[in-house]
Amino acid sequence: MGALARVEGEGAMRVRVRNGTVEEVALDIYEPPRFFEAFLRGRAYTEPPDITSRICGICPVAYQTSAVQAIEAACGVEVDASIQALRRLLYCGEWIQSHALHIYLLHAPDFLGYDGALELAKVVPDVVQRGLTLKKAGNDVMRVVGGRAVHPVNMRVGGFYRAPTAADLEALVEPLQRALEAAEETVRWVGAFTFPELEHDHEYVSLRHASDYPMEAGRMVSDRGLDIGPDAFEDHVEELHVEHSNALHAVLRGRGTYMTGPLARYSLNFDRLSPRAQEAARAAGLGKTCRNPFKSIVVRAVETLYAVEEALSLVRRYRRPEPSAIDVPPRAGRGSGWSEEPRGLLYHRYTLAADGAIEEAVITPPTSQNQRAIEADLARFVEDHLDLDDQALTWQCEQAIRNYDPCISCATHFLDLSVERRP
Amino acid sequence: MTKVLIAGLGNDLRSDDGVGPAVALKVAHAAGPDVTVLVNAREPADLIEVWRDADVAIVVDAMEAGLAPGSTRRLDAAALAGASLPASASSHLLPLGHVVELARTLGALPGRLLVFGVQGSAFGPGEGLSPGVQQAVDRVAAEILDEIGAALAP
């Protein structure tokens, strides 16, 4: 939805209270990508990276990455390490810009008692400018590697249309070095906020890689023993239709609610962070795991620091892929791919005909996977705040929902809260 | 040389939300090489950093203002300042009105900023503009090209 257009009630949250107890919290904030799955049917296997990247203005790279990896798997090809490294660099850019946007312009004002980024900027313009500088470094990476800052067009099945030259990437060093300082300062800044007490016990799920903090690659693991490759995703994750919502709720078969996203990623991969990011996390008061959703802002800041360091390291080690893309002949088959969008695991699966036409597309984004966990957390949060009137409760709930940075593909001022209070 | 930046905000796979990109594309084809056009701007906050370097910036966006589909509104930065802003930002994006005010606070507004809003009627997933909105595309593009002409006139 364009930014001028505001449609009330795009996001809805219904709370049913009986006798002072929360009986149900139903959240309807998310529209599943069913339109895109249908839109992709019959199209060429080369088209999903571009089409699915238009689902979300914030995380186009995640959609491209999951799509190309699924299609390459279906066609039985693997790209080489130099192409994989360039994908990871582009992914770093997306993490930096998405996390910086969320931390500075959306989430931090809640903790500091401001209505929004504008009020924050009036009091501490330098701080907001630091956030924008950080965000811009991410956009710079996306522009140089991805082709365009806002809607990258350079990634394709098999690699890139054009690989940047070493000189192109050299131009990123200076902004990334400045971003490194800004990112470290960001961790210190948000680490000093005051956080409401709330701990959840959801099963944490994220990718895990042999050596790196997970972005574009890894196996899907959980803190309760899950460990699978992409082909097994649909055997383990079930998407349920729920009555109150047009969204699908994903659960782990036989296990139930789970959570993906920064908290899970961090808690399952602390040992994969750089020493500098680990140290910043400790200094900001985080342990090796984090189960307080309000502290997700600190985890995002730590991940931003990591992504800036990683981007710098990838730029310095850059080996230009030759050729910039490998040939990917179509074949009949089925392939799955995934990656860690800033807000959690994004899964794609494509079934192709022999000529490469798409017979079936399945897209499972993080918000559909997290919907149940978010509702469960909110039910506890609302229960602790039932003394508030509906207006104050709406405001608090909007803040609580921001912890999860959910995909709300077209809502702006988003929450239409209805509370049914019965004796 | 006056630096002119045009941005079409919106998503062309969300029906009338694609009007910003549709207008920007038309302008991109007609405007000279001295004009920078962002056809598919999706994230309003990104405009702040590009506005910094512009003398004249024009944004086209779909709007929901309770008017007939295809109706247009033309707002300058001062008019946007008068518009009432919602109490809180979305969970995911910062509304354009907020972004303009934020840019103003940070001293990043271009010398001249114009926003064209086009009333949409359908915002569900899908390709193509509804008829009233489609008709507005040429009209708004022509107005923007006039503005560009005026800005670049010696």
Image: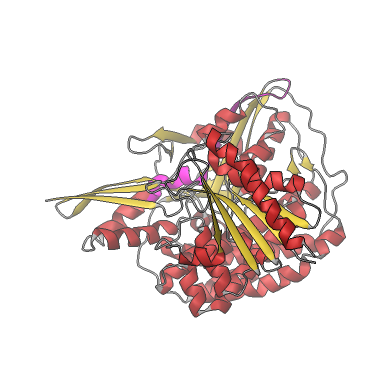
Residue A218 visible to an observer of this rendering: no
**Image quarter in which the N terminus of chain B is found:** bottom right
**Image quarter in which the C terminus of chain B is found:** bottom right
**Number of marks in picture:** 0
Picture quarter containing residue A292? Answer: bottom left
Query: Does B4 appear above or below A361?
Result: below
Residue A87 visible to an observer of this rendering: yes
Tell whether position A369 is magenta: yes
Q: Is residue A291 left or right of residue B47?
A: left
Which residues make up the magenta segment? Answer: A354-374
Q: Is residue A376 left or right of residue A57?
A: left
- Residue A108 location in percent, x, y? 47, 69
Q: Is residue A319 left or right of residue A154?
A: right
- Which sits in the foreground, B128 or A105? B128
Tell whether position A216 is magenta: no
- Residue B136 location in percent, x, y? 58, 42
- Which sits in the foreground, A230 or A395? A395
- Residue A45 location in percent, x, y? 70, 30
Q: In the displayed orientation, state which residue is furthest to the left.
A: A423
Query: Does A309 appear above or below A30?
Result: below
Query: Does A336 appear above or below A27?
Result: above
Coloration mode: secondary structure
At x 46% / y 53%, what residue is drawn? A412
- Residue A113 location in percent, x, y? 39, 73
Q: In the displayed orientation, state which residue is furthest to the top.
A: A354
Query: Does A211 appear above or below A246?
Result: below
